[in-house]
Image (cartoon, rainbow, N blue to C red):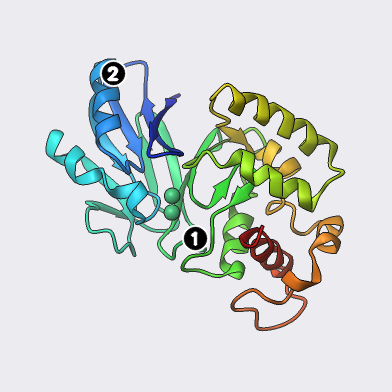
Amino acid sequence: MVQVKAIKAFSDNYIWCITDSQSQLAWVVDPGQAEPVLTHLKDAGLTLAGILITHHHYDHTDGVADLCKAFPGIMVYGPSNSPFKGITNTLSEGDKVTVFDTEFAIIHTPGHTLDHICYLNPALAFTGDTLFSGGCGRLFEGNAEQMQHSFDKLKQLPEACKIYCTHEYTQANLAFALAVEPNNAELIEYAHWVDTKRSNDEITLPSTIAVEQKINPFMRSDISGISQNIPTEYQNKSKNILQNNEPWQNFAGLRTWKDHF
Ligand code: ZN
Ligand code: FE
């Protein structure tokens, strides 16, 4: 099984570095900056073998060109419908990518952007800016219905699956989650743990599907206690709501509420 380490980038991004125990090779996920990756690889004595991209945003792709210059011929996997031009191996829903001994299934997860994909293995998943710990990505290009469907796919993962998302947004996400579910005891306990971690400048990731099912309002949007708590002003105000009483309406209400939180 592969090992995954975080390389910090920008103010709150993590570039995930994947290695195995047999080689001095590494893969990175969403290198928005080349410099921290090059420093990490040099310090660890690693050679870059490939790059996985979840979506086109600059904070996930701007380091690709310089990394390809430093390691000519490496593979850059990314979504087939991406506006980002640096992808050498395009991926669509149902495709597979093998990194060392670990196979990842590709799912298309539009919502944050239209090109967004996630890389799934039963033991670990790279969810980019789709599923965050305690939250979900903003709807820049897609709509709530698409994001709800993307979450439905992620909900199929085993409970023990580790969630590697791109941003350290957990603490802010939990402040919102607590507004949604002030009496969720597991959420309160998790928020304390996260506060301690962050006050020591420690990472809160990876999370797991089991944790997210207990604390993430966007994983729990179908729970009746949650829908009742969404303020009326944020219901039926999301973009692209065409009909009432669709299952993703709670999700849409939550996302709009979070946008104003
Ligand atoms: Zn993004
Ligand atoms: Fe991002």
Which residue, given by chain and number where applicable, does mark 1 sit on? 112
Distance from mark 1 CB to nearest ligand 1 atom below 8 Å = yes
Extreme-bottom residue of the structure: 242
Q: How many marks?
A: 2
The residue drawn where x is 32% and y is 16% is 22
Q: Amino acid at mark 2?
A: Ser
Q: On residue 23, which mark appears?
A: 2
Closer to us: 237 or 150: 237
* Labels 2, 1: front one: 1
Whole-angstrom CA distance, mark 2 to mark 1, is: 35 Å
Closer to us: 47 or 34: 34
Q: Amino acid at mark 1?
A: His
Closer to us: 243 or 141: 141
Q: Is residue 254 above or below residue 101?
A: below
Dot 2: element:
loop
Q: Is residue 50 above or below residue 231?
A: above
| Residue 114, quarter of picture | bottom left
The spot of residue 219 in percent (x, y) is 69, 51
Q: Quadrant of the N terminus?
A: top left
| Residue 205, quarter of picture | top right
Q: Is residue 256 above or below residue 47?
A: below
The spot of residue 174 in percent (x, y) is 69, 43
Q: Is residue 108 left or right of residue 76?
A: right
| Residue 246, quarter of picture | bottom right
The residue drawn where x is 43% and y is 25% is 5
- Tell me if mark 1 has few (under 14), some (14-19) or many (20+) residues whose alpha carbon lies within 10 angstroms of its own: many
Q: Quadrant of the C terminus?
A: bottom right
Sequence order check, earlier mark of 2 and 1: 2
Dot 1: element:
loop
Is residue 164 visible from the viewing direction of this image? yes
The spot of residue 192 in percent (x, y) is 73, 29
The spot of residue 77 in percent (x, y) is 30, 48
